Image (tube, rainbow, N blue to C red):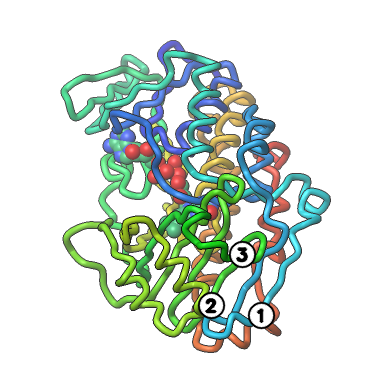
Amino acid sequence: MSSAAPIAIIGGGIGGLCAAIALQRAGLRAHVYEQALVLGEVGAGLSVTPNAVKGLDWLGIGAALRALADEPPRMLTCHYATGQVLVDIDRSDTLQRYGAPYLQMHRADLHALLVARLRELDPDALHTGCAFRSLTDDPRADTVEIRFEDGRSERASAVIGADGLKSALRREVFGADAPTFSGYVAWRGLVPREALGGRVLSAGSAVAAGPGRLFVRYPVRHGALVNYVAFAKQSSWAPEGWSQGGSVDEAREVLAGFHEEVLAILAATPGGRCHKWGLFAREPLPAWVAGRVALLGDAAHPMLPWFGQGAASAIEDGVLLGRAAQASTSIAEGFRRYEAARHARVTLVHRESAAGGERLSGANPEKLSNATVKNEDTLGIFTYDPVTVALPD
Ligand SMILES: Cc1cc2nc3c(=O)[nH]c(=O)nc-3n(C[C@H](O)[C@H](O)[C@H](O)COP(=O)(O)OP(=O)(O)OC[C@H]3O[C@@H](n4cnc5c(N)ncnc54)[C@H](O)[C@@H]3O)c2cc1C
């Protein structure tokens, strides 16, 4: 596939950057337009599962990724009140089993690696302060005109919408289906190790599972910080916005009855403030491609976070988009093959992620210990390799 004008990618999150690097790797010019003026410390912890690591290796950041991330040796699921271990998954043989490690890191560190890699390939590929507003497909000129909120415009041979859950591009091209509230609210924080007063936590990840409530924690930056997310079922989400400043006191109140270790981690959150937001999702679209426009990542298929596969799916999308572009003779063919390669996989992960949350936050956490469950391992989610999976004709 070749093009005179560059391909425009709207959104410089994990998915948009991976897509840009993958397209550059395929020999195409790809420019990323990100609304933020400055790229900063957005987000907190991120699990980068083996399927995603294989894609990031192909994009050329494998060594740097491993230097910054941590490998959890185990993943524990514990009873919310007693702390009793209900499920203990050994992750020490992940590399042998899946061909890549299971990593955990700060999202900002992964983002910075991707920015550096893209700039290495093309120093002018990333444009900040560019909030997408609308576009017009111009078949006579064989381009798409993109307009930004500040009145500027650009021409592109094709456009990729990687602008996340609230995608303006999805609304513009695929119609307005509002994301739906999942029934869960989350509180997220990062606690410096010193703030725990010498408390020693079990190595790797731990989930405290209680009826309608969950608490997940794992170390990032080689243990300098503990990343946590607390989830609770709630019947509605405050209409004033999607994201709010949350207070640790509120999170502690919601998790009343949880094990003392959980409450101590919450209490150590700097400033007593944490990030609070409602979890929203959408059904995957039946089609993500319309003419010279394609969607990717959360813009195409936002999913609930229970399997930690949202960013991983965006990474997989980026790799398959690049591979499809490389193997195709036109944009239409490349987009069609990208969508065909991704749809069944994403639909499976999307559906099973939603079910995973219901299972973990069910009424009887005790039953988790002897349940035969569908999880990331048994569903084969980590076995997937975006670099070698068949690309449909
Ligand atoms: C609690 C929680 C925990 C999670 N944990 C994990 C995990 O462990 N592992 C995992 O793989 N996933 C995880 N996820 C999911 C993951 O964070 C997302 O799925 C992932 O970030 C999606 O990437 P994206 O690039 O599609 O979208 P985003 O990361 O949302 O990026 C979209 C980008 O587009 C920009 N943008 C938005 N609108 C415009 C516009 N109009 N014009 C230009 N730019 C625009 C935004 O500023 C942003 O930079 C988690 C999610 C949640 C809620």
Q: Quadrant of the C terminus?
A: top right
Q: Where residue 134 sits in the image (x, y, percent)?
A: 23, 32
Q: State which mark lies toward you, 1 or 3.
A: 3
Residue labelled with disc 3: 200
Residue at figure coordinates x 70%, y 42% from the top left? 389
Residue at figure coordinates x 42%, y 40% from the top left? 295
3D distance between C-alphas at marks 2 and 3: 20 Å
Q: Where residue 74 sits in the image (x, y, percent)?
A: 71, 63
- Rendered image quadrant of residue 377: bottom right
Residue farthest to the top, as pictured = 4
Residue labelled with disc 1: 86
Does residue 69 sit above or below 327 in this rendering?
below
Q: Are marks 1 and 2 in contact (CB under 8 Å)?
A: yes
Residue labelled with disc 2: 209
The secondary structure type at the circle numbered 1 is strand
Mark 2: which amino acid?
A: Ala
Q: State which mark lies toward you, 2 or 3.
A: 3
Front residue of 215 and 219: 219
Mark 3: which amino acid?
A: Val
The secondary structure type at the circle numbered 2 is strand
Q: Quadrant of the N terminus?
A: top right
User: Disc 3, ligand 1: is the CB inside 8 Å?
Assistant: no
Answer few, some or many: residues within 10 Å of disc 2's Cα (few below 14, many 20 plus, some between 14 and 19).
Answer: many
Q: Are marks 2 and 3 in contact (CB under 8 Å)?
A: no
Q: Where residue 198 sits in the image (x, y, percent)?
A: 56, 62
3D distance between C-alphas at marks 1 and 2: 9 Å
Does residue 170 sit above or below 196 in this rendering?
above
Front residue of 78 and 115: 78
- Decide which of tag 1 and tag 3 comes sooner along the chain: 1
Residue at figure coordinates x 62%, y 87% from the top left? 367
